[in-house]
Image: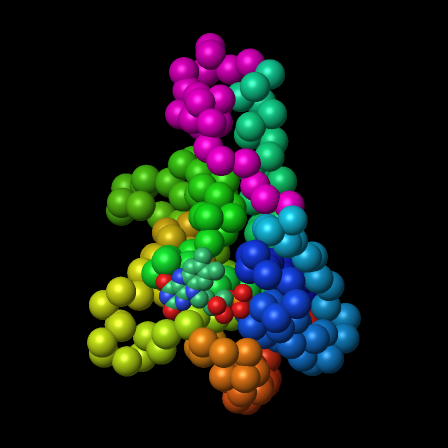
Amino acid sequence: MTHLLHIDSSARGEGSASRRLSAEYVQAWKTHNPHGTVTYRDLAVDTPNFVTPGWITGVFGPADAANADTQAALEGSERLIREIEAADVLVLGVPMYNFGVPATFKAWIDQVVMAGRTFAFGENGPEGLLKGKKAIVLRASGSDFDNPAFAPMDFHAPYIRGVLSWIGITDVEIIAVNGFTPEQLDAAVREAGNAIAASVDAAPLAA
Ligand SMILES: Cc1cc2nc3c(=O)[nH]c(=O)nc-3n(C[C@H](O)[C@H](O)[C@H](O)COP(=O)(O)O)c2cc1C
């Protein structure tokens, strides 16, 4: 059965364009995949821990320094990693904050990018271990980063593509809207409906 992991990270509730887009995507996906299942995680409400000394020791050793703290830190990561492992499709609502991703989303990334667990260094160099998944990123920003005047400051899309591919998720689609006023964002969200429908239609049907 196909499983979808839906994650939001906007600090806003009502009025968040990335939340509206991700909800619309998941709704369309459910219609397309009536037997598909969904796990939801709101990083603004349920914010992952930051990396701690215990986490670093737990991941990088030494093994004889492991204790209850390192164990607890790794269990937090393990929960989030298993959510990704269980998913065929990741739908990520990620606004742009200061040209990058929200700190809550970065905290999630820091918990799930783990040496020896989600990536490894093999004979052919680095290898992502979470293979065979697709990620769709629903992004909202104020400025239009297709505009060459702003494009060099877009550290959001390249970062997400880079870090997801590092852990093996190389199939990443970004659907972006932009606008400074609620009216502009509304119009952009409405326009993105076509891209969402096309993306969902292109996805394989759930078994
Ligand atoms: C803390 C913060 C930082 C932001 N930084 C940027 C930025 O660097 N570039 C940009 O174009 N918009 C920026 N914005 C605007 C947001 O990307 C925009 O309001 C977007 O709609 C937020 O997503 P949301 O509607 O899902 O909450 C920022 C907004 C906030 C609250």
Q: Is residue 165 visible?
A: no
Q: Report x, y in % for residue 64.
A: 46, 10
Q: Report x, y in % for residue 138.
A: 51, 70
Locate the C terminus by quadrant: bottom right
Q: Is residue 115 left or right of residue 182?
A: left
Q: Residue furthest front?
A: 181
Q: Report x, y in % for residue 49.
A: 54, 36
Residue in front for this viewpoint, 27 or 128: 27
Locate the N terminus by quadrant: bottom right
Look at the image and give the residue range highlighted in magenta: 46-67
The residue shown at (57%, 56%) is 11
The quadrant of the rendered image in which ligand 1 is seen is bottom left
Above or below, 39 relative to 68: below
Above or below, 83 relative to 66: below
Per the image, is 6 magenta? no
Q: Is residue 10 visible?
A: yes
Q: Report x, y in % for residue 21.
A: 58, 74
The residue shown at (59%, 80%) is 200
Residue in front for this viewpoint, 113 or 193: 193
Residue in front for this viewpoint, 101 or 57: 101
Per the image, is 63 magenta? yes
Quarter of the image where one finds residue 92: bottom right
The residue shown at (41%, 43%) is 119
Above or below, 14 relative to 131: below
Q: Is residue 39 left or right of residue 105?
A: right
Q: Is residue 19 left or right of residue 141?
A: right
Q: How many marks?
A: 0
